[in-house]
Amino acid sequence: MSKPEMYRRTKQGGFQLGADSECWHVEADYIDLSPNHRPRGTLLRIDSDEMPIVEDTARMALIIVDMQNDFCSKGGWADQAGFDTAKGRQVIPGIERTIAWARQHSLPVIWVVWASRHDLQALSAPTLYQYKKTIEMTGIGESLGDYKALSSGTWGTQVVEPLKRLQDENDLVVEKNRDNAFYGTQLDQILRTQGLNTLLFTGVNTDQCVATTMEDASFRDYNVLLIEDATGTSNPDFCKEAVLINTWQCWGFTTETKRLQESKPTQR
């Protein structure tokens, strides 16, 4: 068996990264994320903060993380715990624009929500402590009046308005009980069986559930694209800024909805 050549030259004078099946071609003015795949959808060139990327829409999926009542609505867990839910709601217009773009290009839309079992049997002490720091603080599964916090099948785990109106019956909903949406869920299985390799990330909190899911995605060899104006956090602004830096330095690419909307079909 011959040794694969990981840095071979491309026809355009750039270089290849990785094995032939799932390699990138890094050219002078763009990066092709799937150069050895025949496009099944539309081949688009999308500007990012570092360099434009080229990818087939049929290999892309939109991931929307934790845009649910418990994190973004008045009366939800985060609001009652004293967090600034307004900062999470500020990204709703950006997510709306991203959803419209995804629908236009027939991207699968996957809604990730924190929704724990009612018996809490899947939750460890470190995870429970994350949501109950004091005796007075309402923890996962405890009563918030009409429902139990962050529990499956309740108002708190429903997608926040007005995004709820944008959900489609063909969208997928993945319930998780850790920050990382890959941990203990079928998300990886869903993506791989559908041949989805490039993931667009939106939602809250940028520096927590979005970041851990996105980081794990890169470790699993998915291509990562963070939509900057469609993610937010209740934490100080520097927390999001650190994630943006780490994304383009380590995990993938960052862009904005305006650049998605301006993306153009291209050819190889």
Image (cartoon, rainbow, N blue to C red):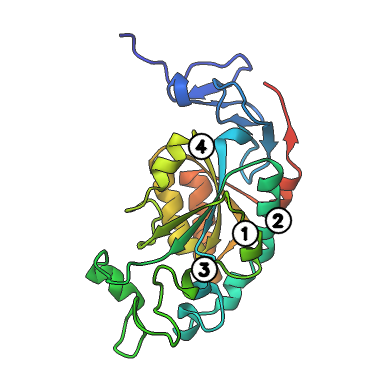
Residue 185, horizontal then vertical, whole percent: 36, 52
Residue at the spot of label 1: 230
Dot placed on the residue nearer the N-terminal end, 1 or 4: 4
What's the distance in space between the residues labelled 2 and 1, CA to CA? 8 Å
| Badge number at residue 158 | 3
Residue 223, horizontal then vertical, whole percent: 50, 39
Does residue 77 appear in the picture of this structure?
yes
User: Looking at the image, do the residues carrying marks 2 and 3 touch, with CB atoms under 8 Å apart?
Assistant: no
Q: Characterize the local packing of mark 3: few (<14), some (14-19) or many (20 or more) Cα atoms within 10 angstroms.
A: some
Residue at the spot of label 4: 196
Residue type at numbered disc 3: Gln
Does residue 235 appear in the picture of this structure?
no
User: Looking at the image, do the residues carrying marks 2 and 1 touch, with CB atoms under 8 Å apart?
Assistant: yes
User: Looking at the image, do the residues carrying marks 2 and 4 touch, with CB atoms under 8 Å apart?
Assistant: no
User: Looking at the image, do the residues carrying marks 1 and 3 touch, with CB atoms under 8 Å apart?
Assistant: no
Label 1 element class: strand
Residue at the spot of label 2: 97
User: Looking at the image, do the residues carrying marks 1 and 4 touch, with CB atoms under 8 Å apart?
Assistant: no
Dot placed on the residue nearer the N-terminal end, 2 or 1: 2
Residue type at numbered disc 1: Ala
